[in-house]
């Protein structure tokens, strides 16, 4: 069977002080997750450990600074893949020698359906 995308949720997260790209990414993923409910998956009888695929894309200005394994571990269900790409926004604070990091997350859920 081919897994079909049935859910796409978007989220935004930030780290206002410290420039932590992973923290911003985790917050963006949690924001996306809080917008959805997986009742459909239970209703369809899909095994979330074997028949549910979760593809996460994180957009930040410095993708190589995102700990992809930490983001992956934050997802409670499914076979998870995480990719970080150039995106998001860095807002520098010239006076405070600091940066606010804004991350975007797209969380797509695919199910093995006939």
Image (tube, helix red, strand yellow):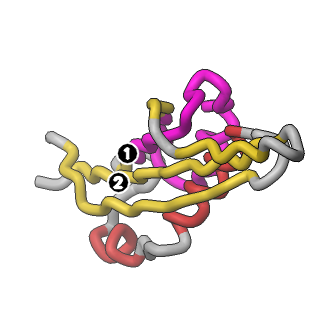
Q: Position of residue 80 (x, y in %)?
A: 48, 40
Q: Earlier in the sequence, mark 1 or mark 2?
A: 1
User: At 48% from the left edge and 51% from the top edge, which residue is drawn?
Assistant: 105
User: At 54% from the left edge and 59% from the top edge, which residue is drawn?
Assistant: 12
Task: Decide which of 114, 100 is in the foreground and name it.
Answer: 100
Label 2 near label 1: C-beta < 8 Å? yes
Q: Position of residue 97 (x, y in %)?
A: 86, 38
Task: Decide which of 70, 12 is in the foreground and name it.
Answer: 12
The extreme left residue here reads: 114
On whether residue 15 falls in the magenta region, the answer is no
Q: Position of residue 56 (x, y in %)?
A: 45, 44
On whether residue 75 falls in the magenta region, the answer is yes
Local crowd size for mark 2, using a 10 Å CA cut-off: few (<14), some (14–19), many (≥20) = many
User: At 24% from the left edge and 61% from the top edge, which residue is drawn?
Assistant: 6
Q: Position of residue 95 (x, y in %)?
A: 86, 45
Task: Decide which of 76, 62 is in the foreground and name it.
Answer: 62
User: Which labelled disc corresponds to residue 53?
Assistant: 1
Q: Secondary structure at mark 1?
A: strand
Query: Disc 1 versus disc 2: distance between alpha carbons?
Result: 6 Å
Q: Secondary structure at mark 2?
A: strand
Location of the C terminus by quadrant is: bottom left
Location of residue 23 with respect to 81 vertically, above or below: below
* Quadrant of residue 109 within the rendered picture: bottom left
Residue 81 appears left or right of 89: left
Residue 93 appears left or right of 30: right
User: Which labelled disc corresponds to residue 109?
Assistant: 2
Location of residue 109 with respect to 41 vertically, above or below: above
User: At 50% from the left edge and 51% from the top edge, which residue is drawn?
Assistant: 104
User: Which labelled disc corresponds to residue 83?
Assistant: none
The segment highlighted magenta reads 53-82
Location of the N terminus by quadrant is: top left
């Amino acid at each position: 069977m081919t897994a079909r995308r049935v859910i796409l949720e978007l989220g935004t997260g930030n780290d206002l002080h410290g420039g932590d790209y992973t923290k911003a990414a985790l917050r963006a993923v949690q924001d996306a997750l809080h917008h959805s409910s997986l009742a459909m998956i239970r209703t369809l009888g899909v095994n979330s450990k074997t028949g549910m695929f979760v593809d996460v894309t994180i957009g930040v200005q410095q993708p190589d600074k995102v700990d992809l394994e930490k983001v992956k571990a934050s997802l409670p269900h499914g076979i998870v893949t995480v990719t970080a790409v150039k995106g998001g926004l860095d807002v520098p604070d010239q006076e405070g020698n600091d940066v606010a990091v804004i991350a975007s997350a797209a969380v797509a859920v695919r199910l093995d359906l006939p």
